[in-house]
Image (cartoon, rainbow, N blue to C red):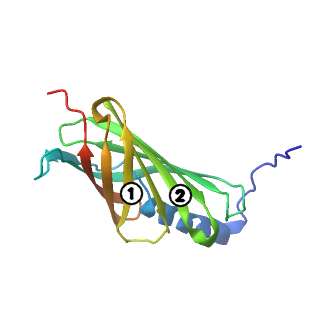
Amino acid sequence: MMRITPPRQARGLAGHRRLVRLLVAIAAVIGAIVAGTTVAASANSGGSEGRHVIHMQTTLVSVTTNSAGNGGPGDVNANLWSFTTSSGVTGHADISCQVFPGSEQLCHASFVFPDGQIYAMTAATPMLNQEFRAGIIGGTGAYVGASGQIVNTPVAPGVINRAFYLLAVKHDD
């Protein structure tokens, strides 16, 4: 029989600070991944046929950790980001990362636009201020058939510039 235990409370200010540093590092690594203050985005066609590029800046809205391993293997970090495109379209990104031994994390992201979603995935090691990439693994709506990669560049704690390099996207033009 599976035993369910209640979440543990933070142990003092030092534990809280360590948790905050971990969460900021995780946010800088993600995706997909993935804005609450000033956010800007723009989209344009790339230089090659069939390629579409979306640039955006995202800011972390919230982070929650579901503890399965007391700060180690099995923990899942859930992140919420919001974004606005240069034409004023708004959306959000839901990103979850599972912690594995050696501090590596497997992260899944859904970028939710009014006309569809883009899905991404990456295995990453949390490091502040270091660029990382995520694979675009699919999409819905206007992004059906999407593939490619997202280049994520942290610019400040909780703020990431993202460039989506879409190799295949359905266009309704």
Tell me how far mark 2 sits from mark 1, CA to CA.
11 Å
Q: How many marks?
A: 2
Q: Where is residue 161? Give x, y as percent.
A: 29, 58
The residue at 60%/65% (across/down) is 19
Disc 2 crowd rating (10 Å Cα; few below 14, some 14-19, many 20+) is some
Label 1 packing within 10 angstroms: few (<14), some (14-19), many (20+):
many
Between residue 67 and residue 19, name the one nearer to us: 67
User: In this rendering, is residue 64 above or below 129?
Assistant: above
User: Disc 2 or 1, which lies upstream in sequence?
Assistant: 2
Report the quarter where the C terminus lies: top left
103, above or below 88, in the image: below
46 and 21: which is toward the camera: 46
Q: Amino acid at mark 1?
A: Ala
What residue sits right under mark 1 in the picture?
Answer: 134
Locate residue 19 relative to residue 139 in the image: left or right: right
Judge from the rendering whether residue 78 lies leftward or rightward of residue 170; answer left or right.
right
Q: Which residue is drawn at the image coordinates 19% and 27% (left, top)?
A: 172
Say which residue label 2 marks: 106
Q: Position of residue 6 (x, y in %)?
A: 79, 48
Q: Is residue 73 above or below residue 47?
A: below
Q: Residue at x 44, y 63 (%)?
A: 29
Q: Residue furthest top?
A: 172
Residue farthest toward the left in the current orientation of the protein: 47
Residue 118 visible somewhere in the drawing: no
